[in-house]
Amino acid sequence: EAGVTQFPSHSVIEKGQTVTLRCDPISGHDNLYWYRRVMGKEIKFLLHFVKESKQDESGMPNNRFLAERTGGTYSTLKVQPAELEDSGVYFCASSQVSGETNEKLFFGSGTQLSVL
Amino acid sequence: GNSVTQMEGPVTLSEEAFLTINCTYTATGYPSLFWYVQYPGEGLQLLLKATKADDKGSNKGFEATYRKETTSFHLEKGSVQVSDSAVYFCALMNTGFQKLVFGTGTRLLVSP
């Protein structure tokens, strides 16, 4: 069974440009999460999809970030325009719907974003 | 609010040494506690978890006990191997919420 897939694995862009990150969750997983780790600090929650709906987007830093999950399958996270402080590792995770808080999350290997 | 504090690294050990990585937390409610590990070039993997006070999570020789009285969840291993070199993240998830709150991560380097 394929795991959570993220691409690109690395992206280097200039300040002001646009970047789109993609996450393919494990097939059949309705829950999809985005997290990011900036500058070696803690990993912070960005948002949570249940199927195509945004369940919780309280962690989105500002309106330069747009997450979508059309059709409830893969998700994209667009940063437009990118700023220097957006550099970091963006992780995606997915899980099955179980109704339990402690359902196991499966993480992708992350996208390393560098904004120059 | 909810937060996790873990010891800064890197932690550098020789093979077969004893490992402790400290983790304390602040939470409203009664959280579940987790240790995740990120090996070089890979994604985060759940290492172990504990869901209530005095529970001990264990996996691959690693252990951590949920201590409510000290709000701690320290990670231990009796004899580390070179292959344990990775970044370890302590995390909590509050009941009724589906998002993890992570610490800053601790890099472990084990030399032969």
Image (cartoon, coloured by chain):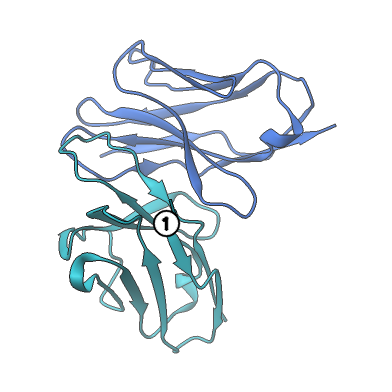
Chain colours: A cyan, B blue
**Is A22 or B7 nearer to us in this picture?**
A22
Rendering quarter of residue A63? bottom left
Name above or below for residue A59 compared with residue B39. below
Residue in view at x 22 percent, y 35 percent: A101
Rendering quarter of residue B71? top left
Residue in view at x 16 percent, y 62 percent: A54
**Is A100 or A66 nearer to us in this picture?**
A100
Q: Position of residue A86 (x, y in %)?
A: 45, 71
Name above or below for residue A14 compared with residue A53. below
Identified by mark 1, the residue type is: Val
Quadrant for the C terminus of chain A, please.
Answer: bottom right
Q: Position of residue B42 (x, y in %)?
A: 57, 52
Residue in view at x 50 percent, y 34 percent: B6
Left or right relative to B73: residue B96: left
Name above or below for residue A84 compared with residue B81. below
Q: Position of residue A90 (x, y in %)?
A: 44, 63
Rendering quarter of residue B20? top right
**Chain of the residue on which disc 1 is drawn:** A
Q: Residues within 10 Å of mark 1 (few under 14, many from 20)?
A: many
Q: Residue furthest front?
A: A1
Give the residue pinned by disc 1.
Answer: A4
**Is A105 or B32 nearer to us in this picture?**
A105
Residue in view at x 32 percent, y 52 percent: A94
Q: Secondary structure at mark 1?
A: loop
Q: Position of residue B97 (x, y in %)?
A: 19, 41
Left or right relative to B86: residue A28: left
Total numbered labels: 1
